[in-house]
């Protein structure tokens, strides 16, 4: 069929919808050279006319034409309302597998609506005359064969980002003009909702867009006009000749529009051109909040947490348990349905038998009795079915989700959508069972929030409102009116962990708790939150949360308490991945002891306040679901977010600090000021005289941090007045003291801690314990706090370790070798914490819990040392352990020599004695090898892992395994077996102690 023939035939047609629809579609197939449904699919499995469907409103319906993964197609008679047809088709969509295209036609025009998930819908309207254009025919052809070609390029995420950023910039501009930020927030949210109401038809005739158009021409009339509109929306009534519904909900109670410039109105008119009906409120709120909040404006262009990431918590905590409940109800209902069918079969069998027998009074009575029993049983079963459906719908209606750090409401909105989707599924299932149609009852009242930020708290309410309206319209339901926005008191604007009077806040009772609490490191709590708040935290949560734990852990403990008090059933919260170790993990250990961690992602990328971070997603509480860790089923999830057996003695987080390891491992000095100086400057100061006749070498020494160990030495020194030099005595060292007076004193005088202010010339945390332990050694072992590889190095005792180094007060190669073994490396990775993907080594959880080989523990190696002929150094230990000490020391000594020769080849360097005697030599690269030497770092060496390095480590591992009394191939055991053996040693020794 040619375009002219098709157009002529259907221009002349006066047939009704029922008579014309299928023929029109078949003609269209001929025009496009496409097979008809019956030609390609005789059984109607994927392409057919009158596909049976259930509308989302529940009544029976038919899609006039359906092609799987392509389209649903609805016909209407000529010049009928095709918008009604689209709404009708929308109701079919869920039962049709949500096809990507929804097409309506009245035989004179064809309108294609795109319905791809996550995109802003497009609409293509083709009149009969348009079919002469080959481009339009190709468009229709794609609908039949390649619908992906019609996928809109604009996603809802991109649209929302653009809208939120432009809107946020307007809010920022208004704030900069001196307007109250809260007033700006409220005014902008009123405008936001008007944009949305305009595009979904809640405001008639594009009323708000026209108002802005007039306002740009007559700027002085705009504020009173907006006031009039907002007042009308607050109560309902007429705006000019246009009827306006009653919106209320508190959003339009205060009508106080801010003065706008002509450029402001121009921007608003540009924003009005966007498709606000497709805005993703869970994204918009987060981005818009950054424009309102002065503390977040620099993040306006930053990324946000995507909905899929949030659903990793919402699904296991909120939806999966409910889905499982409904599955069990469905199984029970299926049994009842089968029971009804069996009764009916029995009746039919009795009637069939009676039809071949002589009819007697008794037989008639028997059949009547069978029928009555079957009818009674069916009635009883239907009542049970109705009750099960009704009870579960009531369960959903009463279900409450609390987000105690709700921000702008993105977690709450996604939880609400999920609950509404599940309710809708249950309603459809109930109707298929013959029960009356139900109207959705799940709504904004199902979600509760606590939020301290005043801007975010108000945004959260608007986010939930818009999300609710979008869901209802997208599923073909009309909106309840009078008012449209029900007053909801779902967001408490307050602190979630400390009341204003310093007491512990109460959280509302809820079924589950979800959210993304604020991230703030334990060491920063006092400086950021203030002394009073910090003290309140310590007081309220004493004995429950270590003082050094991150701020996020208080939300975990509060959620755990809610579960323990039966005020919640489960919780799912986000934390930085450092919660897996250190002081933070004590909170998870408490959770593990009192309830169950049933779902977790141990180390995942996340967006927090616009920045990319690494987080752990943790779900805990009462559940019958099987534990899932990193998307894989496991037997149990431990407090360090690793999987293992549910048997006692298999959880490595139960390892305890051992007395024999005490006072040997220390964190380096913490300066809290610019005490470090360039090496060349230090060398200029060293020869200078002082009034007390003493050398500056007493207070100047090399400094080493993690970078110096993992890369190349930076030649940085430090001014170090030790732990007890008075200010008067420090002043005798003129140049160092003058330098600190200028660089450090002004900063330290403003520090919150009294001791830091008083002793400003000393390091904030000078580590007297570490200094005492290193005092009589000539060298010590050091490892970076955080590093890609867990390596250990030797440092001269004159070098001060920075706080990013861990210092072990031992000078023997035996201890060095044990620490460098695979066994200690695995232990440190599991027992340590992490910052992002980088493992962190800690003195308490990593070193003090590690079970050294018997006889070679730090308690055994803290005495005299002995140098072997090879140059290796061993500790003086009991005779029965000496051979093991020697074997480990020899292997470790060789490993270190090989590494040092690779790091600093003698042919490439010159060793220059330092200006101070006994200080380590300076390593000066020969000019021709300088560039190559820069690449010789420990990190690069372990990236390459040459064969000689691997062999040296294998030899060392074998020597350490022998010291444990393990078999020769113990170093080749899998990680789980090694950790289980070490844990058994730890627990046994702790019991002995």
Image (spheres, rainbow, N blue to C red):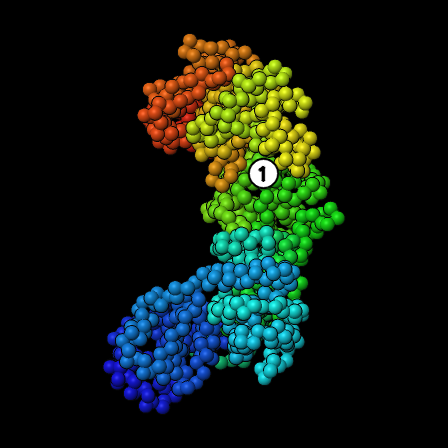
Q: At 54% from the left edge and 69% from the top edge, which residue is drawn?
A: 262
* Residue picked out by circle 1: 585
Q: Quadrant of residue 489?
A: bottom right
Q: Nearer the viewer, residue 648 or 114?
A: 114
Q: Residue at x 58, y 45 (%)?
A: 519
Residue placed furthest toward the right? 501
Describe the element under mark 1 as helix, strand or loop. helix
Single out the residue that lies furthest toward the top: 869
Residue 597, quarter of the rendered image = top right
Where does the image place residue 630, in percent across and percent down from the top left? 47, 46
Q: Which quadrant is home to the N terminus?
A: bottom left
Q: Quadrant of the C terminus?
A: top right
335 versus 637 height, above or below? below
Foreground of the two, 838 or 636: 838
Percent position (x, y) of residue 683?
Answer: 50, 21
Residue 453 position within the rendered picture, expressed as x and y whole percent measured from the top left: 63, 54
């Amino acid at each position: 069929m040619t375009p002219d023939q098709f157009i002529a035939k259907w221009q002349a047609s006066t047939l009704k919808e029922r008579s014309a629809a299928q023929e029109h579609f078949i003609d269209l197939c001929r025009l496009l050279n496409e097979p008809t449904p019956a030609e390609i699919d005789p059984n109607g499995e994927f392409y057919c006319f009158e596909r049976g469907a259930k509308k989302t409103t529940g009544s029976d319906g038919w899609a006039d034409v359906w092609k799987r993964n392509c389209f649903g197609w609805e016909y209407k008679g000529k010049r009928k309302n095709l918008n009604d047809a689209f709404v009708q088709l929308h109701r079919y969509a869920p039962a049709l597998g949500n096809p990507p295209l929804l097409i309506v036609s009245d035989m004179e025009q064809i309108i294609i609506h795109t319905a791809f998930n996550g995109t802003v819908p497009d609409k293509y309207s083709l009149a009969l005359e348009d079919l002469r254009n080959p481009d339009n025919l190709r468009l229709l052809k794609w609908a039949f064969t390649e619908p992906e070609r019609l996928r809109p390029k604009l996603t809802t995420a991109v649209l929302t980002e653009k809208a939120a950023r432009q809107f946020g910039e307007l809010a920022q501009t208004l704030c900069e003009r001196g307007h109250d930020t809260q007033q700006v927030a409220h005014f902008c949210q009123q405008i936001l909702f008007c944009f949305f109401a305009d595009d979904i038809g809640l405001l008639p005739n594009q009323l708000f867009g026209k108002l802005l158009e007039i306002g740009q021409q007559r700027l002085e009339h705009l504020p009173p006009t907006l006031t009039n509109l907002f007042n009308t929306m607050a109560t309902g009534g007429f705006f000019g000749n246009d009827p306006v519904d009653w919106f209320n909900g508190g959003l339009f109670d205060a009508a106080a529009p801010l003065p706008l410039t002509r450029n402001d109105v121009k921007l608003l008119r540009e924003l009005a051109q966007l498709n606000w009906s497709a805005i993703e409120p869970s994204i918009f709120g987060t981005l818009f909040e950054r424009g309102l909040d002065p503390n977040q404006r620099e993040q306006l262009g930053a990324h946000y947490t995507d909905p899929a990431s949030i659903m990793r918590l919402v699904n296991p905590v909120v939806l999966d348990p409910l889905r499982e409940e409904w599955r069990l109800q469905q199984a029970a209902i299926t049994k009842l349905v089968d029971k009804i069918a069996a009764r009916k079969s029995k009746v039919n069998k009795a009637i069939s038998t009676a039809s071949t027998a002589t009819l007697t009074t008794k037989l008639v009575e028997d059949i009547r009795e069978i029928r009555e029993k079957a009818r009674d049983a069916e009635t009883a079963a239907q009542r049970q079915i109705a009750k099960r459906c009704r009870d579960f719908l009531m369960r959903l209606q009463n279900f409450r989700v609390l987000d105690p750090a709700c921000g702008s409401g993105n977690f709450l909105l996604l939880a609400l959508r999920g609950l509404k989707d599940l309710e809708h599924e249950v309603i459809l299932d109930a109707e298929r069972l013959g029960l009356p149609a139900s109207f959705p009852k799940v709504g904004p009242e199902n979600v509760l929030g606590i939020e301290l930020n005043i801007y975010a708290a108000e945004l959260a309410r608007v986010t939930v409102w818009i999300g609710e309206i979008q869901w209802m319209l997208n599923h073909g339901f009309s909106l309840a009116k009078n008012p449209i926005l029900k007053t909801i008191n779902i967001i408490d604007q307050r602190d979630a962990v400390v009341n204003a009077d310093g007491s512990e806040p109460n959280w509302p009772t809820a079924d589950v708790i979800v959210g993304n609490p604020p991230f703030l490191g334990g060491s920063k709590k006092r400086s950021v939150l203030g002394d009073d708040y910090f003290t309140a935290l310590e007081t309220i949560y004493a004995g429950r949360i270590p003082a050094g734990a991150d701020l996020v852990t208080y939300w975990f403990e509060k959620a755990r308490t809610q579960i323990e008090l039966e005020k919640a059933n489960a919780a799912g919260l986000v934390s930085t991945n450092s919660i897996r170790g250190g002081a933070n993990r004590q909170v998870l250990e408490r959770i593990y002891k009192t309830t169950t961690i049933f779902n977790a992602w141990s180390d995942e990328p996340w967006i927090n306040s616009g920045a990319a971070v690494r987080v752990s997603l943790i779900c805990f509480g009462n559940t019958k679901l099987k534990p899932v860790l990193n998307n894989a089923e496991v037997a149990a999830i431990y407090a360090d977010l690793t999987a293992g057996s549910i048997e006692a003695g298999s959880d490595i987080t139960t390892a305890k600090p051992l007395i024999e390891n005490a006072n040997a491992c220390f964190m380096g000095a913490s300066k809290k000021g610019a005490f470090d100086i360039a090496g060349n400057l230090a060398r200029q100061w060293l020869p200078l005289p002082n009034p007390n006749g003493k050398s500056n070498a007493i207070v100047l020494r090399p400094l080493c941090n993690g970078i110096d160990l993992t890369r190349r030495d930076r030649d940085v020194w430090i001014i170090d007045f030790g732990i007890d030099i008075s200010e008067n005595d420090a002043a005798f060292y003129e140049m160092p003291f003058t330098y600190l007076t200028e660089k450090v004193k002004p900063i330290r005088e403003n520090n919150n801690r009294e001791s830091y202010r008083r002793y400003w010339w000393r390091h904030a945390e000078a580590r007297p314990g570490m200094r005492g332990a290193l005092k009589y050694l000539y060298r010590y072992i050091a490892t970076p706090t955080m590093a890609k590889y867990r390596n250990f190095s030797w440092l001269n005792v004159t070098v001060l370790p920075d706080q990013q180094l861990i210092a072990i007060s031992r000078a023997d190669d035996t201890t060095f070798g044990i620490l460098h073994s695979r066994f200690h490396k695995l232990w440190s990775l599991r027992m340590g914490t992490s910052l992002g993907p980088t493992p962190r080594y800690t003195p308490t959880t990593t070193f003090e819990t590690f079970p050294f080989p018997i006889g070679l523990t730090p308690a055994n190696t803290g005495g005299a040392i002995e140098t072997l002929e090879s140059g290796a150094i061993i500790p003086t230990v009991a005779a029965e352990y000496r051979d093991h000490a020697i074997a480990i020391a020899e292997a470790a000594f060789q490993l270190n020599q090989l590494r040092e020769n690779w790091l600093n080849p003698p042919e490439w360097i010159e060793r220059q004695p330092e200006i101070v005697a006994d200080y380590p030599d300076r390593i000066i690269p020969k000019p021709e090898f300088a560039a190559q030497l820069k690449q010789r770092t420990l990190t690069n060496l372990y990236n390459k892992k040459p064969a000689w390095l691997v062999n040296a480590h294998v030899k060392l591992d074998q020597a350490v395994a022998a010291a444990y009394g393990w078999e020769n191939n113990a170093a080749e055991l899998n990680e789980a077996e090694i950790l289980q053996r070490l844990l058994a040693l730890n627990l046994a020794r702790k019991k002995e102690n």
